[in-house]
Image (cartoon, rainbow, N blue to C red):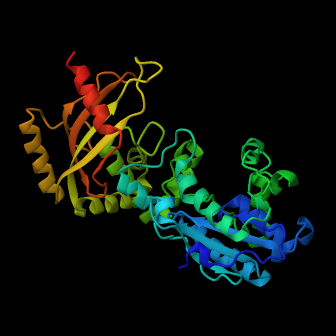
Amino acid sequence: MLDPTAIPPVPAHVDRPVILSYGLGVDSTAILLRWLSEPASRDFPLSHLTVVVAHTGDEWANTGALVTEHILPRLRAAGVRLVQVARRGPSLARDGVVVLDDSRAPRTLYSQGTYKLSDEMFAAGTVPQTGGTRICSIHAKGEPNDLVIAHLVGSRPYRHVLGFESGECRRADKDRTYDTDQRHGEYPLITWKWDRADCLERIFAETGQWWPKSACSFCPFSLSNQEGRARTLERFTTEPEPACLALRMEHTATALNPRQGLLPTARLIDLARGFPSMGATLERFAAQVADAEHALYRVRRVWPPKREAPARAGRAARAVEIMATGSRGRMRAQLAATAFEHTVQVDMSDADHPRAWVQRRSSVAGPGAEEFYTTAPATARHKVGRTFPRAWADQAQQALF
Ligand code: SF4
């Protein structure tokens, strides 16, 4: 494993390096295969091309296996440089990235990464967020890519190639706003007028494989519509461990926040329970949870008034505190004792998560606060948000009036 500064920049004689951000999925695989097998499809020699992969650490195993079987040998045969990077920790500024491999003869795909996106989610006790921009993707893929590209090209102008399909002109337009005097975004699939079906067919013609969608196995975007849910559950039946990982991630997230399911308005666990083929996986997941060290968590959340519209809730601040750790049985007993101290009952209305509610939010859209105790596998770290103490004190003050 190398620091990015330890890898050689693109040779000085290459005055406009071509960098392909390779996501392992259908779109960028189609570009790569066409460039490799059809020289007339590109206006640069392959020696000017660097393929960069930023690993989240949570890619489906079968995608990794297909890349290893069909793409790495072709890159080796053509002598194309492949640089594989991953995050070293949760903060790019503090932890940086690591170069897992830099080779013109790549033999191994390091898709397990180092610090995985799932490590970050478990530590935060949450799931990737679907509102607004894909922050998880920016942190796990975009930023490590950018950091390594900056080192590879130095101050030279470069061509940054992305796999947006012919129907994704709006994404390309948005990406163009990141162009500078140095960086020039390029989208060959749009130029070639290739949509997803064209990409799939081209890949099939070259490899004999219907290429799967690349994603983290727990990606909530893959679960956002019926087709994606069916596809994901089918993959779960052949890859039970990623299924258990997704279920465990959601389990802790929903313990700490009942609204944090992996589906837009529901939980993956409830979807899985409806599929008989998930039976063995659900048993495996249940056993993993039962054996895990648990924590008794105190969770407080406050929604301060929005500055420009005080009747509406602003951005929530959260405190997650670990009160004790031990077996699930011990933590459930401690939860009961804590409920007794607060003169409340343990609420069992959420079948997966008993809670002792000390305070419930009075309105769903307005400012407010909630506080409860619950038990969950002890993966989430003790964390009091920076803005929390002040916001919590302010709401307590307001509640007196
Ligand atoms: S695949 Fe999904 S979960 Fe993974 S980084 Fe991309 S958007 Fe986030």
Q: Position of residue 347 (x, y in %)?
A: 19, 36
| Ligand 1 image-quadrant field | bottom right
Which residue does the image show at 70% across and 70% down from the upper left?
A: 152
Which residue does the image show at 12% across and 34% down from the upper left?
A: 345
Q: Position of residue 275 (x, y in %)?
A: 43, 50
Q: In which quarter of the view is residue 285 placed?
A: bottom left
Q: For this view, does 375 lie left or right of residue 247?
A: left
* Front one among 146 and 122: 146
Q: Quadrant of the C terminus?
A: top left
Q: Is residue 208 visible?
A: no
Which residue does the image show at 78% across and 65% down from the upper left?
A: 156
Q: For this view, does 53 lie left or right of residue 194?
A: left
Q: Residue furthest front?
A: 155
Q: In which quarter of the view is residue 378 placed?
A: bottom left
Q: Is residue 371 above or below residue 181?
A: above
Q: In which quarter of the view is residue 70 placed?
A: bottom right
Which residue does the image show at 23% across and 35% down from the upper left?
A: 371
Q: Is residue 91 above or below residue 269?
A: below
Q: Position of residue 10 (x, y in %)?
A: 75, 75
Q: Is residue 377 visible?
A: yes
